[in-house]
Amino acid sequence: MQEKKHNLDLDVQYADTRLEQEITQAMLQRWVEAALLGPAELAIRFVDAEEGQALNRQYRGKDYATNVLTFAYNEGEELGDDDPTQADIILCTDVLMREAEEQKKTVEEHAAHLVVHGVLHAQGYDHEHDEEAEEMEQFERDIMEVLGYPDPYAD
């Protein structure tokens, strides 16, 4: 989406190594950069269902593993042009792989979408209300199209 590349400090962690060869740091970097609106310091961590469930339970009060969790550390703060968005984005490998199969998508397509979704959350986008959800989903569609992936919300 963005013409200009923003300063990005990206840490990738494969606590669950099943997708380490398939979803590379270079791919993750490309997906993150496509969704960035400014500088960022991000960590992307791949976890199994057990860790994903524990994190979701501890921080959101929901006792199940979910596909992506975003922990935005400067959420709600007014950031200057040079102030980086800081966040951890947690991808649950078990849920990601199951959903990709159920939705008849490749793991790569679904992972790209979840990363874009998480990066937008880190930058303050939300989908709690219909209007916000429509705006965020359209932005995701646009970013995915630029990346060369199909509409993640198409049936």
Image (cartoon, helix red, strand yellow):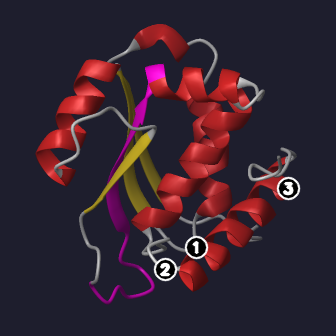
Circle 1 Cα neighbour tier, 10 Å, few/some/many (<14 / 14–19 / ≥20):
some
The residue indicated by pointer 2 is: 129
- Residue in view at x 48 percent, y 80 percent: 129
Name the disc covering residue 13, or none.
none
Q: Is residue 92 magenta?
A: yes
Give above or below for 25 relative to 128.
Answer: above
Direction from residue 2 to residue 82 in the image, left or right? left
What whole-number distance in Å separates the C-alpha atoms at marks 2 and 3? 24 Å
Question: Looking at the picture, which amino acid does disc 2 mark?
Answer: His
Give above or below for 1 relative to 112.
Answer: below
Q: Position of residue 66 (x, y in %)?
A: 39, 38
- Location of the N terminus (image quadrant): bottom right
Q: Disc 2, disc 3: CB below 8 Å? A: no
Direction from residue 74 to residue 91 in the image, left or right? right
Q: Quadrant of residue 128?
A: bottom left
Question: Looking at the picture, which amino acid does disc 1 mark?
Answer: Ala
Tag 3 secondary structure: helix
Residue range highlighted in magenta: 77-94
